[in-house]
Image (cartoon, grey):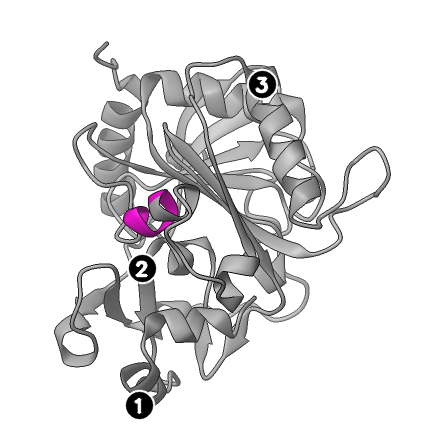
Amino acid sequence: MMKKEIYWEKALKQTELSIKKNCLFPLKTIDITNDIYNSSDFIIRKLDTSIFYKSRIFGPKPNPFSPWETILEIDRIGSNHQLILNKYPVQKGHLLLITNTWKPQNGWLELEDWEAIKEVNMDTSGLWFFNSCREAGASQPHRHIQLLRRNSYDKACPRENWFLDYMESKIGDTKLFKSVIVNNIDMRNSAESLYQIYLDLSNKIGLGSPKKDLNPKSAYNILLTNNWIALIRRTRDNVYGFSINSLGFAGYLLVTRISNNNYLKKNGPEKLLENFV
């Protein structure tokens, strides 16, 4: 069944308006994959970080989601969530699903979060990702889940085959393999069933359970598509000048002026990822 993609169409319109009003700042990057890596399972881009230094704020940082900027609004989702544009998008129409009142990013995702994800996904779907805390690459402590829209015929991400091979036991006993868990999922199913899969995988990978643990026992990332979900248990956010969030494990790497490109070129992107698990 074709999706209506009302949220996506509104995201495109609000993107143009927000850029004109100087309220949205797309990340400026250059594709340097061919200079460093000779395969298609990673896309490596050099990031211009000057945008983040133009308006430094000293003292405690304000919560950008409380309140959120009205010009970035897409729609209210249920009673507890708001869909907005990412102020610093990695692609056009980069969406954030945020809680409309304070919920911690480092707490357990709840059933109502999965209800909101499902509601958005019924209209506009793609690659969902979640960074559980600063050590997992989260930039804000207020709960937010991100969506990069994809066509139905697109690969969800460059490393999608890695996750599919994982489920078919085609991947060896590597350090990365031991820190990732992947499962089939059908986003047409009930929010309750999606939530239960999240709880089961969290327990299996050693994050614990909300029934026993106030917060997950470790930093982690989630990658979520219409057909599969992956949880990655994390130990750190930065190494060799690379800051990695969920998108790094999806196959999207950002290089900055402090990144050790020689390490990346010599050892490869997958070896780099092993330093984060």
Q: Where is residue 219 shown, x and y percent of the image? A: 65, 57
State the CA–CA distance, disc 1 to disc 3: 45 Å
Q: Is residue 176 visible?
A: yes
Image marks 1 and 3: residues in contact by CB distance under 8 Å: no
| Residue depicted at 39% across the width and 85% down the height | 258
User: Magenta span covers which residues?
Assistant: 160-164
* Residue 53 visible in this rendered orientation of the protein: no
- On screen, residue 251 versus residue 153, left or right, reads right
Residue at image position (18%, 69%) is: 30
Instruction: Report the Cα–Cα distance between label 2 and label 3.
Output: 29 Å
Q: Which residue is mark 1?
A: 262
Kindly identify the amino acid type of the residue bearing the numbered disc 1: Asn
Q: Are marks 2 and 1 in contact (CB under 8 Å)?
A: no
Amino acid type at image mark 3: Ser
Instruction: Look at the numbered disc 1 and give the secondary structure of its residue.
Output: helix
Q: Which residue is mark 2?
A: 252
Q: Position of residue 103 (x, y in %)?
A: 69, 37
Q: Would you say residue 161 sits in the magenta stretch?
A: yes
Is 31 inside the magenta-drawn segment? no
Label 3 SS = helix
